[in-house]
């Protein structure tokens, strides 16, 4: 399969820094703060992998999966000279073919799900949540779903559409509206435990969220059994 990121991949980190003033990096690493040494964490569509490196520096056992060899090569460059308690495991694969069910304390999809059209994005999400342990977490960092007053929503939409247009042109990503990830997660039986917003030009442009499976009530437990 052709590597869609051969052109834009090498400058991905540079573009994200220029576009967000490092807010994208902060968004990607926000939910790493709760990781414990030895936690198993998977990053899907890892890009240049600075969020994965941050997790490894915290003592997590990190696996990264990316279909783009360009992105994995960039991550390998960023790994030079670094040493961790657990070496980062790199997997070159289609995420839908990566089948390690219920093996991870945390599965992370940072700025990854937005590359797909919505029906396929939903399919990818449904696969990713199967990789999460029963008591684990699913994390998404991405562009903020429009909320607030008319001006704030207009800014959030404009900020997203500039980015998605660029990646549609240079990487052939899907062109679509901003996804409402909390809604999709709740429909999959997850509850949002924590969210954090990140401002660009003083307005919430990005957000990260951590979700876990909803606890079953006693009647639900009996039905499930």
Image (spheres, rainbow, N blue to C red):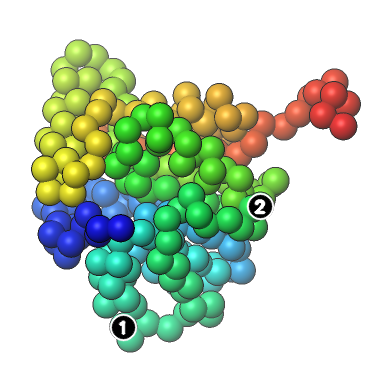
Above-or-below relation of 148 to 17? above
Q: Position of residue 23 (x, y in %)?
A: 25, 48
Residue shown at 54% from the left, 67% from the top: 60
Quadrant assignment for the C terminus? top right
Instruction: Look at 64% across and 36% down and name the residue there.
Output: 213
Residue 20 horizontal side relative to residue 75, left or right: left
Q: Secondary structure at mark 2?
A: loop
Q: Is residue 36 left or right of residue 122?
A: right
1 or 2: tag closer to the N-terminus: 1
For disc 1, the marked residue is: 80
Identify the residue under disc 2: 102
Instruction: Say which mark, if any, is on residue 224.
Output: none
Q: Residue at coordinates 40% horizontally, 66% vertically from top-left?
A: 92
Confirm whether residue 172 shows in the render. Answer: yes
Marks 1 and 2 in Cβ contact (< 8 Å): no
Residue 155, percent from left and from top = 16, 26
Of 101 and 214, which appears nearest the observer?
Answer: 101
CA gap between label 1 and label 2 equals: 31 Å
Mark 1 crowd level (few <14, some 14–19, many ≥20, 10 Å Cα): few
| Residue 43: % across, % down | 45, 57
Residue 56 seen by the camera: no
The single residue placed furthest to the top in the displayed view is 150
Q: Are there few (<14), some (14-19), or many (20+) residues within 10 Å of tag 2? A: some
SS label for mark 1: loop
* Image quadrant containing the N terminus: bottom left
Numbered disc in front, either 1 or 2: 2
Residue furthest out toward the bottom: 81
From the top left corner, tell me how far across and down residue 8 is, in percent: 14, 57
The residue lying furthest to the front in this view is: 1
Q: Quadrant of residue 176?
A: top left
Tell me if residue 215 comes above or below residue 149 in the rendering.
below
The residue shown at (37%, 41%) is 113
């Amino acid at each position: 399969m052709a590597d869609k990121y051969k052109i834009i991949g090498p400058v991905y980190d540079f573009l994200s820094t220029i576009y967000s003033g490092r807010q994208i990096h902060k968004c990607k690493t926000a939910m790493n703060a709760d990781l414990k040494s030895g936690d198993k964490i998977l990053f899907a569509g890892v890009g240049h992998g600075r969020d994965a490196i941050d997790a490894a520096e915290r003592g997590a056992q990190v696996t990264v999966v990316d279909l783009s060899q360009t992105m994995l090569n960039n991550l390998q460059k960023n790994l030079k000279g670094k040493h961790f308690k657990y070496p980062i495991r790199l997997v070159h694969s289609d995420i839908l073919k990566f089948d390690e069910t219920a093996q991870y304390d945390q599965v992370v999809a940072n700025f990854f799900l937005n590359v797909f059209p919505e029906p396929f994005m939903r399919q990818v999400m449904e696969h990713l949540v199967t990789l999460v342990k029963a008591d684990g977490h699913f994390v998404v960092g991405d562009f903020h779903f429009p909320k607030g007053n008319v001006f704030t929503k207009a800014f959030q939409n404009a900020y997203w559409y500039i980015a998605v247009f660029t990646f549609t042109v240079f990487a052939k990503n899907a062109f679509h509206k901003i996804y409402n990830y909390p809604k999709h997660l709740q429909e999959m039986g997850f509850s949002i435990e924590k969210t954090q917003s990140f401002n660009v030009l003083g307005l919430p442009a990005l957000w990260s969220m951590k979700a876990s499976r909803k606890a079953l009530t006693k009647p639900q437990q009996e039905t499930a059994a």
